[in-house]
Amino acid sequence: MAITEIRLLPPLALARLGSSPEPLDNYDLAVPDAVAPRAIVPAPSLRLDTDGHLTVTQGEGPVEFRDHEGRIKPVAPFFELWAKVDAAGEWVPVTEALLSANGLSVASVKWSAHLGNHKLHRRTNDPNDCIEAVVAPFSDHAAHAVEGACGNFLDGATLPLGQVQFARPSPDHPGLRLRFTPAHGKVYGAHSAVPDPDIVKAIYDSAKGGWRGYRETNDTPPNNYAGRRLTNPADIFAGYDDDVDHISYGYVDDECDGIITASLEGPGVNLQCFARVAAGPPAFAPDSKPVRTVADELEQALLGPQADTVASEEEVAAVSDIVRRALETVRLMNTGQLNQGGTTRGVGMARMDILDVNRKSDPIFEPMVAEALAIRARHERVLLALESGSLTWFARILREYDQVGDLTDEGRRRMPGMMRNADGRHLALTRRQVSKIRAAANYLVTGRTGPAADAAPGGVRPLNLSAQLDYRAQGNPPNSRPDTAISNAFPGLEMDFRNVWKRLLAGVVLHESLNFVLETEMDELAPLKGMFIMQIAGVELTAPVTGPDANGVVGPLKDAYGNDHMALEWSNVLADIVHQHAGQPVHCVFQSMDGAQRIERDLTVRPFFEKDSAVIARALVEPGALTQSLCAPWQNDYRECSCFYWAANRPDYVNVEPRADGASSGNNWMQKDRTSSTPAVYINDDWQDDRLLSHTDLVRDWEKALRFIIANKDEPPVV
Amino acid sequence: MSARLRAQLIWRGAAPTLVPTPEEPDFADAVAPRERAIAFLTIGSEIEHALMVQYLYAAYSLNDDQETDTRRALVKKWKAAILEVAREEMGHLATVQNLLTLIGGPLCFEREDYPIVDPGLWPFPFQLEALTKDSLAKYVLAEMPSSEVLAKLKLTDETNAIKQRLQVNDGLSVHRVGALYQQILNLFTAGPMIQGPQPGGATPAPFVATVDIQADSLPYQASAGAWALGYQDILVETASDRTSALAALQKISAQGEGPISTTDANAKQEYEGSHFRRFLDIYREFPEPADWTPARPVATNPSTRPGVVDPARCIDGIASPWAALANLRYRMLLLYLEHSFCIDSGHGSQTRSPRGALVSWAFGEMYNLRSLSEILMRLPLAPGSALMAGPPFEMPYTLSLPTRAVNRWRAHRDLVMAAGALIDQLLVPGQPQAAYLRALRAADQTALDQINVLIGA
């Protein structure tokens, strides 16, 4: 019974901000039928008291996402310690009994945490702007505060990022587990002569660092290193504008990400294992999931971009879930509005196509089919078809990852529609998602010989790495899982998953959203800094952008820099490379910004996961890097993005009902006044209408201002 | 097609024989070119509709449960290919409605029911049947190009052999659909401006007058953007003038039969993509009955009608409510389609209307028909029958939409409610399709909610 390996499960969990002292209870998401919204069903929860004692609670009424004072309950995930013992091939929970059998005790288990918030550093590039929180190893059961320190903070000031606590094992709960509770979702700021009423506290010292007053141009960034290194999108931090620049207020939010470590030390044993956590805002439509999630990315990284050519019933169910997630997303989008052409703020991807590459102004779909209820009906019926075994056409109209630059009418009408991809153009699913859908379609058209049997309940044993990725720790609610986190990040919500790829090639640091070398880590590679990387292992990293120009002539479309090619998002373009060449050198081709110089080098592909583990490798992303390019604070994204990709978590169109003229009526989720007597008229978000929530409203009191949406309906106003 | 229209049509030319002969449907009485075009488009619509239904039935009849991998792979390939053709026929049907709309004719979603009354006007008598070598022979010949094109493709002997087979086995001659489309093309092709008396007293060929071609009908036509979902092989062609009408006709003709003339620049490409070529490929691969049987033993022309007592056709027992539901959903599909042509799409503008919902619902019914067909073909035709049931695709007593808009929604409401009653009847304990039926009911409810608002209820 010797312990040979240990793991923390889940390998990646989401925490969600909220100021209530009561964490969110656990629940399940049930699917009552193929087209109805998921039902939120109370499930056994684990309550952890201040002394580390665990009790199980079972809610009976509706799951409450707020406490009695209206504060949002944080999502505080548990991480369980599992072990592999030499006598058994499978993973088992670590218990006192197991430890004892190995001559160890609970005190032999040491927990530590390293979390970071690198949002400031990602902009200023000042190492003293890195906010780091390190919790030293501990074995007790007290709550340990996670306090972020920063070289440019006021003396003695820290950023509260939450707490970690080791639960006491007991006969009822023999397993060992740690809970991470995130911060409250407060916005801090920089010290100034006139106190800022919108922040909870000044912690940043403007005399030491340049975050307050940091500038990015209002215009297209210059085509040089300084311009190209900016986040994409740029200007996504709280601030004000002058004629030239967007200038930072110096705000600091309490999102973070990082690594939880468990060590087991004793006679003959010295083992370590890790898990990752990222803390972001709540999922405000908790009965919905995004169409492309972090779980989809992880599955592709683990299993490769190609699914089996012959699907199983289980995979058909997984495909149904993808389509369901698409429905859950479009159900919360005002697709009639987002479909429109023109450059008015508040319309969707057609506007982006005009602004980014000067495409002709057109609606994406014919307006009548883009109407919200029509789109919803179409998705419902695809789900219905899946229920009975029909999928063929749907599989054919999916957008290929390397055709995202096809901005012809046909190209823009491919699925998913009207949403933004991690590369800024129209959303493509992961290649593995596409492959799964095609395999399922193939199976359904030719293979199934009757209705699908009810799926067997999922097991709890993490038998392999896929199961570990999918593992749900006891008491963890569904919105702590990666399949509720947006991954078509532009820039993302719970995390900007694009950052995972920046250190994939040993020796260089890539831009999260561009085929551009930000930094090099070896002297001999120094010339590569500031160059574009064009090919890896023969794979082209860019794709042509084509479509009708302003005069309607179809041909190459150029961006503001004159390029008619775009960088493809890393996750899909690197899918084969990470899967086939991990640990191996690959041939890479670099090109200078002016195109005059070309350098070729062989660089080694870092493994995506820790060895024999489902944890994203520590060598790929340091604590704080997964969230570094998100908006600062995150409220800016809620205010400025018109919902091109994340309606399942940040709704757009709510309280939707049919209208007598055949269209729909409903509210903009950002509308302040939403009572039962408020006319359900959608207010277009032009960034000016004061009937919609402002940046200030969100920074000061987002918990009260933002409302949960269940079954597409508002929760009652928070008093 | 109405019996009155049928009575006015004759089939000119000698009866089809092994030697290719001109085949021209025409009118016994003189009619204006526009009306002639409407009549032929109406026939074309019925033919496209009938072919689509028969192809669907044939494809669903294929049985994947074969003894060898090779046979399974063949069946899979044939099924996918025929479903593809059926989908494309749907595009042809929509295009024909667009052309009717263009020249101000009434829409046509009717089709001949069986037993066929006047097989002379049809490629072959309508028959829902399992896919066999003989049924494939009919499909090949119906989609066949002209004799001149066949000669150029060096397929004359092979197609003659297929004709021979059908005549010997079934006593059947098949008219090719392309002949009808050639007539319609001629009617849309403008002749030269008349300059005084014609030599020899010849009468210029009649054609649809420019004044009758209505560009402003475009917002009422079905568009590829709304219906084809970016899938470019489904030709949903709109037309706003003579040129676009001719282009639409040529495209759907070419997709059916391949090259329209021996001088077509894209002859090879058109032949490769044509329904004719695809059916011919399957025909060549398809086994003789004595070899092995790719299809299930499904009934021929199954029926729910009380007057049908033939035990080889009469659906009874467990299949009955499923067949009734299939008929109902078929009717719902046709009415959604028809209704969608009555509402201005607001082409290119931001006008909002329920047309998009009708399009989505129509798609839903296409999926439902597929699902119900698959279910029916796994149920016995009647208790104790060795035959399997199938979707009867029976035409309702009427497809006429009420004249007042609000009553069209009432018609949809009544059908959705009728479907609900059938679903309830089917949802007995132990029903293996319970999940599908519950989801169908839920999807219907969202439609019903919207319909009730449109009615003003």
Image (cartoon, rainbow, N blue to C red):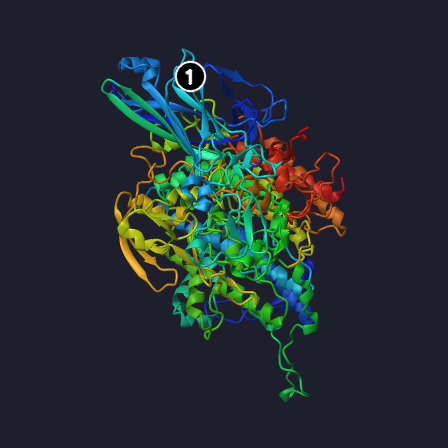
Is residue B389 shown to the viewer in this render?
no
Residue farthest toward the left in the current orientation of the protein: A268
Which residue carries the number 1 mark?
A141
Q: Is mark 1 on a helix, strand or loop?
A: loop
Residue at point 61%, 57% (across, down): A342
Question: Which of the chains bears the disc numbered 1?
Answer: A
Q: In this view, does A182 lie above or below A449?
A: above
The image position of residue A245, as x and y in percent, is 55, 53
Is A298 displayed left or right of A362 in the figure? left
Taking depth in this image into account, of A1 and B312 the one nearest to the observer is A1
Taking depth in this image into account, of B445 and B100 the one nearest to the observer is B445
Is A676 displayed left or right of A593 in the figure? right
Quadrant where the image shows the N terminus of chain A: top left
Quadrant where the image shows the C terminus of chain A: top right
Residue at point 38%, 38% (across, down): A622
Q: In this view, does A581 lie above or below A589?
A: above
**Mark 1: amino acid:** His
The image position of residue B92, as x and y in percent, is 56, 59
